[in-house]
């Protein structure tokens, strides 16, 4: 069986890939990045503050980490609630002790339901980025563009008002997008998005309304993915974070700055039997002089400066 001739005549066929969303390039061929103060590894700790509705619709797909038994699934609902009432404060204590500057991805509905928590984070001066409306409100192919635009606008309006921040970052619920999502984000003042995980470093992403930066937030190193999908132990989670950092720091010493992006969930790692393994991994990383810990927007600013320098 041979390919139809039209396959080779696809108008967007080109070297590396078949679209114009971003320039194709090998990581090793790019301009070397140096982070502030001569640091070689930027540590981006992103904490997902999420709201999972008890009356989950799960359309067109169930949210990752969402309800999984018949209504009312109180077992999973209250576990998620545990993270926002207890686990998150264990995170904050660990971050303050270690000198970590985290970023918080927040569902707009959580900002409405947990005003004290949002006020506490805003008072700390930590950056807050949008995590959409709630975890059961996905962005996906087939979603009406006007409905998605209203959904994004409502999410950002609530979060900006409740936090007092401009909110220029975006992480879709479940990291899911429609074909229109990047354009809509730019129209609503978003400067970077964290859904595309096809790289180790930020890169420029084109839209019809101007450029946005893709800030890859690793799924492979995400606590939920390692513990719940891969069914690895807590100690194995910490070992994988340490291994990733050690490799990136070695690579950075030869090829230029690297980014270690960790996405954390307080309902998972904020548990008393897990928080120690998170601290073990972070202590290993921060023991090295090559590490710069910063919020997502600071990392983006430094990366942009390096590209234009």
Image (spheres, grey):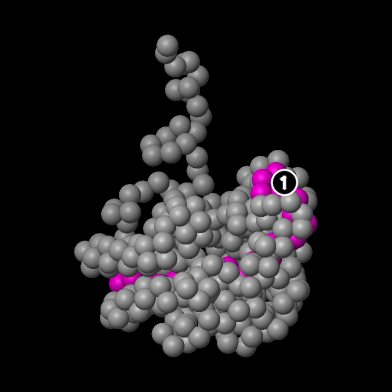
Where is residue 299 drawn, in percent x and y? 45, 72
Quadrant in the picture for the C terminus: bottom left
Quick check: is 59 in the magenta stretch?
Answer: yes
Residue at figure coordinates x 46%, y 72% from the top left: 274
Residue at figure coordinates x 77%, y 54% from the top left: 71
Where is residue 48 drawn, in percent x and y? 58, 68
**Residue 27 higher or lower than 252, as above or below:** above
Residue 297 is at least partly visible in this image: no
Of all residues, the one furthest to the left in this rendering is 254
Closer-to-camera residue (299/233): 233
Mark 1 neighbour class, 10 Å CA radius: few under 14, some 14 to 19, many 20 or more:
few
Quadrant in the picture for the N terminus: top left
Of all residues, the one furthest to the top in this rendering is 1
Residue at figure coordinates x 42%, y 57% from the top left: 232
Residue at figure coordinates x 57%, y 82% from the top left: 89
Residue 249 is at least partly visible in this image: yes
Closer-to-camera residue (304/40): 40
The residue that disc 1 covers is 59
Closer-to-camera residue (142/239): 239
Where is residue 42 drawn, in percent x and y? 38, 72
**Residue 22 higher or lower than 295, as above or below:** above
- Local secondary structure at mark 1: loop
Give the dominant element type of the magenta stretch: helix, strand or loop: loop
Determine whether, in the image, residue 87 is placed left or right of residue 249: right
Q: Which residues are magenta?
A: 40-62
Quick check: is 138 in the magenta stretch?
Answer: no
Determine whether, in the image, residue 171 is placed left or right of residue 235: right
Residue 234 is drawn in which quadrant?
bottom left
**Residue 94 higher or lower than 259, as above or below:** below
Where is residue 44 drawn, in percent x and y? 45, 71
Residue 190 is drawn in which quadrant?
bottom right
């Amino acid at each position: 069986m041979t390919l139809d001739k039209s396959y080779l005549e696809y108008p967007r066929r080109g070297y590396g890939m078949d679209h114009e969303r971003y320039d194709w390039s090998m990581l090793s061929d790019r301009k070397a990045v140096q982070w502030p103060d001569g640091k070689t590894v930027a540590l981006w700790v992103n904490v997902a503050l999420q709201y999972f509705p008890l009356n989950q619709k799960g359309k067109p797909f169930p949210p990752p980490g969402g309800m999984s038994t018949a209504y009312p699934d109180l077992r999973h609902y209250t576990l998620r609630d545990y993270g926002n009432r207890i686990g998150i404060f264990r995170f904050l204590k660990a971050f303050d002790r270690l000198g970590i500057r985290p970023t918080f991805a927040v569902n707009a509905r959580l900002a409405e339901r947990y005003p004290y928590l949002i006020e506490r984070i805003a008072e700390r001066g930590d950056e807050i980025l949008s995590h959409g409306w709630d975890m059961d409100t996905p962005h996906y192919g087939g979603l009406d563009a006007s409905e998605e635009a209203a959904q994004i606008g409502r999410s950002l309006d609530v979060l900006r008002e409740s936090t007092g921040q401009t909110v220029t970052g975006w992480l879709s619920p479940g990291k899911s997008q429609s074909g229109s999502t990047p354009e809509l984000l730019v129209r609503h003042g978003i400067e970077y998005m964290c859904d595309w995980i096809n790289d180790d470093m930020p890169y420029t992403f084109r839209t019809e309304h101007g450029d946005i930066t893709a800030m890859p937030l690793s799924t492979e190193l995400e606590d939920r993915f390692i513990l719940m999908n891969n069914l690895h132990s807590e100690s194995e989670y910490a070992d994988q974070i340490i291994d990733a950092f050690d490799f990136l720091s070695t690579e950075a010493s030869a090829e230029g700055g690297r980014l270690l992006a960790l996405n954390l969930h307080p309902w998972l790692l904020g548990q008393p039997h897990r928080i120690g393994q998170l601290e073990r991994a972070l202590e290993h990383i921060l023991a090295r002089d090559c590490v710069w810990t910063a919020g997502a927007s600071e990392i983006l600013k430094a990366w942009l400066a390096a590209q234009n320098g």
